[in-house]
Structure formats: C-alpha cells, structure tokens
Amino acid sequence: MPALFQGDACLANGMRLAQAAHLLSVPVWGTEQNPGKLGSNPPQMKALCRQTLAKMQFSAVEEGLVEWLRPEVKTKPSGNARSLPKHLQKPVVSAEVPSSIVLAGVEAHVCLLQSALDLLEDEFEVWVVTDACTSRTERNRDAAYDRLAAAGAELLTTEMVLFEWLRSAEHPHFKEVQALIK
C-alpha cells in the first residue's frame, strides 16, 4: 500500500465498505494477488471476508470467483437415475445469486480492471468504488476508470454505496453506518 497513489485513503474506504457490509449482512469476499510475494490483505480486512481467494491470474474470475458468487446447487435427477447420463444432468444455480457486485481494491488498472471486465462479460452489474481503488500512479488509476465506464461499469464513491445500501435514514443500522463515514 505505501507504493500506491493515496493508498491509505483507499484502504480506509475499503474498510468502511467492508464494515458496513458486515453490519448490513452484505457478503464480502477478498482476493489477494500473489500473496507470497506481494503480501496478504490486512488481517482486519480478511476478518470481514467470507473467504479470501489467493490468486496468480490478474482476473479473479479466471481463478474461480464466479463459482463463489454463483454456487451450483446439486439436485437429484428426476426419474430413474440411469435414465439420464451424468453429463446431461445440469446443476441448478442457487436462487440467492447476486446480480450485482461492488468492487474495491488495487491495482485499478490491472487486477480490478480485468476482474470487472470478466464480471461484466458474465452479466454481473459491476459497481466500482472509485475512492476505494487505486494504482501506483494516478494516471493508471484514471485510465482504468475511463475503460470501466466505457465497458458499462457504474463508478461510485464509498458514501454513494453506503447510502444506496441503507436506502433510508430509518434503516435500523443507519447511525452505525453513518458513524463509519464521520
């Protein structure tokens, strides 16, 4: 993080998102690019994640992220089990499949960009939290945002996401989420 443009602010906003998600029962997954060489996510961030995917490919989709987001539910074949070969028995996708995903992280122009483009291709609605993403240079970060917007990703800020999750000042966790912002 020290080598990244506004790395401390990026991490702080990422933590705000993860903490609010935890309060609001929004599932959080983490990814780590080559953690053996580049280091792991901070322990306080990992603690808020359901799972953390250690990866070598730049796109988390290439490493199996979609399988975490859209788990298959195994069902028993109807009729005689011998009547339909296994390769024709299609698993049913869980009813609790997210159609949108909020992305934050580094580096915006490499891992985040390639993951977002693959998620868009897999028909997810992708929200990229611009103040919770960064790169080593401001130019690389901004180029990523340009490309992401052109590809159809929504560009938002941390506060925009938090208030969209809350929907109302009457939400039972409004004060707790508001405290994360102040």
Image: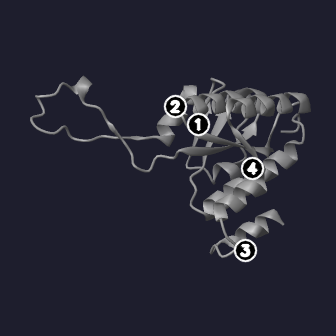
The residue type indicated by label 2 comes to Gly
- Residue hosting label 2: 64
Disc tally is: 4
Judging depth in this view, the residue of 49 and 43 nearest the camera is: 49
- Residue hosting label 3: 175
- Residue hosting label 1: 53
Specify which label sits upstream in the sequence, 3 or 4: 4
The answer to whether 121 appears left or right of 167 in the picture is left
The answer to whether 25 appears left or right of 176 in the picture is left
Specify which label sits upstream in the sequence, 1 or 4: 4
Pinpoint residue 142: horizontal percent, then vertical percent.
85, 32
Q: Residues within 10 Å of mark 2 (few under 14, many from 20)?
A: few
Q: CA distance from mark 3 to mark 4?
A: 19 Å
The residue type indicated by label 3 comes to Lys
The residue type indicated by label 1 comes to Leu
Specify which label sits upstream in the sequence, 3 or 1: 1
Q: CA distance from mark 2 to mark 4?
A: 22 Å
Q: Would you place residue 167 above or below residue 108 in this image?
A: below
Pinpoint residue 45: horizontal percent, then vertical percent.
69, 50
For the residues labelled 1 and 4, say whether their Cβ atoms are less than 8 Å apart: no
Q: CA distance from mark 3 to mark 1?
A: 32 Å
- Residue hosting label 4: 14
Q: Would you place residue 112 above or below residue 164 in this image?
A: above
